[in-house]
Amino acid sequence: MYSYERLLQENKIWAAEKVAANPEYFQHLAHLQSPEFLWIGCSDSRVPANEITGTQPGEIFVHRNVANLVINTDVNLLAVLDYAVTHLKVKHVIVCGHYGCGGIKAADTKTDYRPVLNMWLRNIKDVIRHHREELDAITDEEGRTDRLVELNVQEQVYNLAKTTIIQRCWKQEQRPDLHGWVYGLKDGIIKPVFEMKAGTQIDDLYEYDNL
Ligand code: CO
């Protein structure tokens, strides 16, 4: 058996278990998608959004990329954000990073990862530059990376607040709240590190007044 065939086999078992527990399970899900949460997480295979939050299919709208970045020219992320906020009307957007993130560690080196990854990781180098003083004061390497993971999540929450998608919704509907969380690979615990309630004042450089 090829390794990927195990996934298809497990899928059949999973579907059968769901139907055994509730014969209407898939009919119900097929007609309903009204998740309350948008999750922007790292692609890391150890941080599956539903599993670590004990949520079921239908509860969380998910976008994942390397090091959970919110980049204002990323059409993929912006399409997910717009759909989740404007059409699904989510109440909360969660940016969830994780300690021990390979993308974060890579960005804090001088290694050339070749054009595409260099382009992506450049955004994290900018986070380091914004917080250089605080980060340089941390002497142990793991402590520095942990703090960078937290600061990165915070900056990505700011990046969400800088979009017209979020600002328009804040102004018109007083939602969604933005949350910055960090998941611990070592203990499985999610730590909330930053929050912006709907309507929070942001640097007026980034504010739009004709929404
Ligand atoms: Co990661």
Image: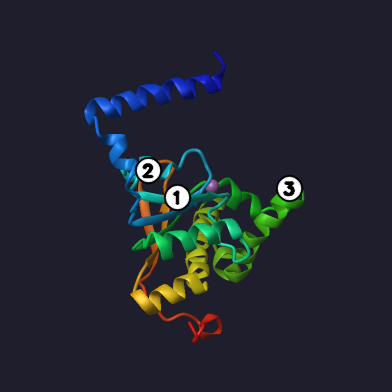
Residue 173 sits in quarter: bottom left
- Pick whichever of labels 2 and 3 is earlier in the sequence: 2
Identify residue for label 3: 113
Q: Which residue type carries mark 1? A: Val
Q: Element type at marker 2?
A: helix
> Which quadrant of the view contains residue 38?
bottom left
Give the alpha-carbon distance from disc 1 to disc 3, as whole Å.
Answer: 27 Å
The disc labelled 3 sits on which kind of residue? Tyr
Give the percent coordinates (x, y) of residue 59: 33, 48
* Label 2 packing within 10 angstroms: few (<14), some (14-19), many (20+): some
Q: Residues within 10 Å of mark 1 (few under 14, many from 20)?
A: some
Look at the numbered discs 2 and 1 and tell me whether their residues touch, using CB distance below 8 Å. yes
Q: How is the image coloured?
A: rainbow
Residue corresponding to mark 2: 50
- Residue identified by numbered label 1: 62
Residue lying at the far top in this picture: please name it.
Answer: 1
Q: Residue at x 52, y 20 (%)?
A: 5
